[in-house]
Image: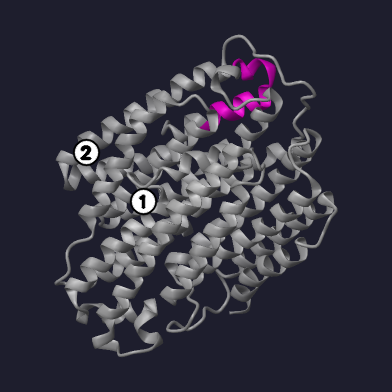
Amino acid sequence: MTALLVVLGVPAGAALVLAFIANWRLAAWLNVAASAATFIAAAALFTAERPAPGHLLLVDDFNIYLIALTAFVALTTAIFSASYIAHEIQRQRLTSRLLRFYHAMYQAFIGSMLMALSADNLGLMWVAVEAATLSTALMVSLYRTPAAIEAAWKYFILCGVGIALALFGTMLMYLAAQPALGEGMAAVTWSTLLAHAANFDPALLNVAFVFLLVGYGTKVGLAPLHAWLPDAHAEGPTPISAVLSGLLLNVALYAVLRFKMLLAANPQALAPGPLMIGMGLLSLSLSALMLYRRRDIKRLFAYSSIEHMGIAAFAFGMGGPLANFAGLLHMTMHSLVKAAIFFTVGHIAQVKGSQRIADITGLTTSHPALGWSLVAGVVAIAGLPPFGVFTSEFLVVSSTFARQPALALPVAVGLLVCFGALLLRLHHLAFGPSSPNAAGSHAVPTLSLVPIWLHLALALVAGIYLPAPLVAWFQSVARLLG
């Protein structure tokens, strides 16, 4: 319990402290230190005593690894952010006052996501996801340009509607549980709900899940509820793009899966899988079409995030040990690889002075470290071996072919179309004649490249060999998800 309190307390305390530190250099490294302390505490959860279920907080096989993954990506993003914002100061895009706000909101955002993952109380989970929405909306508008403010408002309004629907779904879930559990906290405590879900009103359960899927699905970025995601990624600071794609989408999908488990535990309720399969296929299909039309490099990879969250949602909708295993692996690989890609893209946009794909060519010649990092990242996210994304996508297609052969073809076609779009863009970005650098561009610090290489190395190792403890965790949670 102590380790969990540290995991939740450090970001909250750091946010308060960072709000009053005017020296942006000191604030940047305090941000790193707080993120490191959070990650160490998250790692300690694996050996620490877990809180008893039935209270506000919960640590189980499902969320413990996601807590550690979230804390890890938060740490590597903080390290990347330290050098990234230094250059933004030099370019006069940010002021010390805005950076004080940025660092405080970053820790508040990380703390909100960790709280959502740790919550046993469904109301607390909702509050934490709403807090994450507010903090990220403020960070998306950080540059204070008209486009950034518009993107922040779009994000706030669309996700606000989604969160309102999720709240209504949570209330319906409470009403479905109330006859069996009575009034009070028990009817909104997930571990108690799961134990008694078979006795709930199936009609209310069905309606509640639809609202929850649509509501939290908006935060996942699933089509047709995805409109906020490309703008937020393109206009916000690159570290925020990395944690939006790498972390926030996972947390929202995690919330959906918690409720899916409740529905699956009631034999009279409708199967939740077809709804998730439909939204997953729609997201994959939309991304396959839109990736070819993107002209902004950050929007390109934002649509790639919609694709991959669609794949994960599809896998969990299929259900069963193999598909659930594939979905969990895919969430993990997407977090690592997509964060690495956004780290790389952030530096590329700084040295080239543009996010337009037309302005960025020949990176392997002009900036070999960035160019080859981008090549490795795109190869990984496109699903080529030997990276872990290939393994997870292969398992998704294999499990689909074994259980629903008719669905395997559209999934495979969607993956191939997305693969072609990404490689087409990669050829332009990485090879050919070099485009000119921006005035005052700088050499990229080696320290800021370490998170990129670390993420890609982990994805490579996962594609070649999954450690036995990780396999055991995936299998355990896959069985839990049903």
Q: Tell me the quarter of the picture where residue 405 sits.
A: top left
Tag on residue 158? none
Residue 199 picture location, percent across and down: 20, 82
Q: Residues within 10 Å of mark 1 (few under 14, many from 20)?
A: many
Q: Residue at x 67, y 42 (%)?
A: 143
Relative to 365, 64 lies left or right: left
Tag on residue 327? 1
Q: As rendered, which of 67 and 255 lies closer to the eye?
A: 255
> What's the coloring here?
one colour
In this figure, what is the number of numbered marks? 2
Residue on which the image places disc 2: 408
SS category of the residue bearing label 2: helix
Q: Quadrant of the N terminus?
A: bottom right
Rounded to the nearest angstrom, the CA distance separating label 1 from label 2 is: 15 Å
Q: Residue at x 19, y 62 (%)?
A: 271
Q: Residue at x 43, y 40 (%)?
A: 389
Picture layout, residue 313 above or below residue 43: above
Q: As rendered, which of 143 and 369 lies closer to the eye?
A: 143
In the image, residue 370 lies in the stretch drawn in magenta: yes
Task: State which tag comes first along the sequence, 1 or 2.
Answer: 1
Relative to 20, 195 lies left or right: left
The kind of residue on which mark 1 rests is Gly
In the image, residue 467 lies in the stretch drawn in magenta: no
Picture layout, residue 394 above or below residue 197: above
SS category of the residue bearing label 1: helix
What range of the chain is rendered magenta? 361-377
Q: Main secondary structure of the magenta part?
A: helix
